[in-house]
Image (cartoon, rainbow, N blue to C red):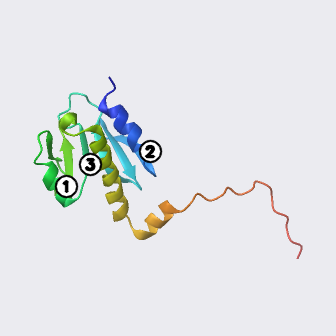
């Protein structure tokens, strides 16, 4: 049986412009433009398994469910924490994490959003350009 960490990581890395790193000892963070949108603890015995951002309406709905609490330190920003991974189906969790990714993306400065949405530029030729005679 794979742990939730494996499928959460695999899923987050499919989302555009996602980077990952470990911070605060053993928390695996997923970011877009250096802004966190999802956190999972690498310690299996940790009480909080997964955290993500949601809309104020979804936050109010989710924290009423068994196995989901306001995220420590981040509840004021509408983050929830799953203390039981079976509180929601995997498909629901993926959709909520995708929404978290979108919420964080939408909060980025417009200029940064435009940069992220630009198609990758073609690499320049390594051939030296001919100099003009003056």
Q: Which residue is mark 1?
A: 58
**Percent x, y of residue 31:** 38, 50
Distance, label 3 to label 1, CA atoms, is: 11 Å
Q: Residue at x 44, y 64 (%)?
A: 113
In which quarter of the view is residue 133 placed? bottom right
Are discs 2 and 3 less than 8 Å apart at CB?
A: no
Q: Nearer the viewer, mark 2 or mark 3?
A: 2
**Percent x, y of residue 78:** 20, 56
Q: Secondary structure at mark 3?
A: strand
> In the depicted view, which residue is nearer to us: 61 or 115?
61
Residue 30 relative to residue 46: left or right: right
Tag shown at residue 32:
none
How many numbered marks have been drawn onto this rendered protein structure?
3
Distance, label 2 to label 1, CA atoms, is: 23 Å
**Percent x, y of residue 61:** 14, 52
In which quarter of the view is residue 111 placed? bottom left
**Percent x, y of residue 77:** 21, 58
* Residue 79 against residue 115 in the figure, above or below: above
Q: Which residue is mark 3?
A: 52
Q: Nearer the viewer, mark 3 or mark 1?
A: 1
Q: Which residue is mark 2?
A: 14
Q: Residue at x 18, y 50 (%)?
A: 73
* Residue 54 against residue 109 in the figure, above or below: above
Q: Mark 1: few, some, or many residues within 10 Å (few <14, many ≥20)? A: some
Distance, label 2 to label 3, CA atoms, is: 16 Å
Q: Residue at x 35, y 57 (%)?
A: 102
């Amino acid at each position: 049986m794979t742990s939730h960490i494996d499928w959460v990581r695999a899923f987050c890395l499919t989302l555009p412009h996602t980077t990952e790193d470990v911070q605060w000892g053993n928390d695996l963070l997923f970011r877009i433009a250096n802004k966190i949108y999802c956190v999972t603890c690498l310690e299996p015995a940790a009480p909080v398994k997964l955290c993500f951002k949601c809309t104020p309406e979804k936050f109010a709905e989710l924290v009423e469910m068994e196995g989901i609490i306001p995220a420590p330190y981040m509840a004021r920003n509408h983050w929830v924490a799953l203390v039981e991974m079976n509180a929601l189906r995997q498909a629901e969790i993926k959709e909520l994490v995708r929404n978290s990714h979108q919420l964080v993306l939408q909060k980025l400065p417009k200029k940064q959003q435009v940069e992220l949405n630009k198609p990758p530029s073609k690499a320049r030729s390594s051939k030296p350009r001919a100099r003009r005679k003056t």
